[in-house]
Image (spheres, rainbow, N blue to C red):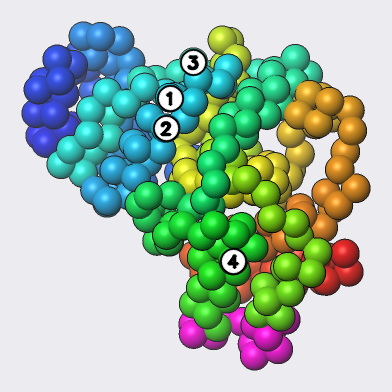
Amino acid sequence: MDTTLDALLEATGLSPMGPSHPLGGGDIAAVYRLETSRGPVVAKRDDPGRLAGEAEGLEALRDAASPLIVPEVLALGDGWLVMEALETGSRTPRSAAALGEGLRQLHAHTAAEHGWPRDNACGRTPQANAPFADGRAFQRERRLLPLARACHERGLLDDRLRGRIEALAEGLETWLPDAPASLLHGDLWAGNVLHTPRGPAILDPAVYRHYPEVDLAMLTLFGSPGAAFFEAYWDGSTPADWPRREALFQLYPLLNHLLLFGGGYRGGVERAVARTERG
């Protein structure tokens, strides 16, 4: 085990009780599970700035006191983040409904400004969060235009598709109403949801405040949380403009995947643009 992790654990009163075991599923950081004098923990090795942003996000989500389980931060330093380990269970209609109810309660924590007091990261991509009072301006200036520019500069978007994204971003005020900004997980794809015996848990956040559909669109990007989830979240009444909002708010994570992982995501970007344009 890394000597810096040993020292961090000892300083926090978490004496290691055996070897660490690598965990799969992470694209960015190295993640390990190990036993300590206070039970099992998960230790993540990554860039210190990204880890600090994740730790702050976990604490913000825990402070919101929604029914969702959020792992407790136990230690942070020297390029390591140590959290409580959670037991894995199975997704059922009941746990999917609990996720929907918990996320609805989380999103009820709103503020006037869209953004976050500090920048953080979504994967390896720096995530600018300087606030805007208007959510349309935040989506345009902090999400769509910077990612479209970055992808274009790397040759991942041609001029035509970048122009369509820019036109879409400039036209948000014509159809998307402004709204209070909800507290978001910020990177809520299915891999960052864990169904535990105690209920659904959310992991690896990239928190900020914005439209609540950001989290919903991430949950449907690579699958679906299920009918029970949406029944609980929307109380049986799907908003009429959900398909268009879903496409819009999938565009930023798709651009981020294009930037991080290459041209295999260009088709997804183009489809999201087309769905948003159609309304």
**Res 110 quadrant in image:** top right
| Residue labelled with disc 3 | 87
Mark before the other along the chain sequence, 1 or 4: 1
Callout 3 touching callout 1 (CB < 8 Å): no
Callout 2 touching callout 3 (CB < 8 Å): no
> Could you say where residue 100 lies in the image, as x and y percent from the top left?
71, 27
Residue 30: in sight, yes or no?
Answer: no
Inspect the image, locate mark 3, and give the three-letter code of the amino acid beneath it: Glu
- In the image, 115 versus 24, the foreground residue is 115
Mark before the other along the chain sequence, 4 or 2: 2
Q: Which mark is residue 63?
A: 1
> Could you say where residue 5 lies in the image, as x and y percent from the top left?
16, 32
- In the image, 101 versus 250, the foreground residue is 101
Q: Nearer the viewer, mark 1 or mark 4?
A: 4
Mark before the other along the chain sequence, 2 or 3: 2
Callout 1 touching callout 2 (CB < 8 Å): yes
Disc 1 from disc 2: Cα separation: 5 Å
| Residue labelled with disc 4 | 137
Mark before the other along the chain sequence, 3 or 1: 1
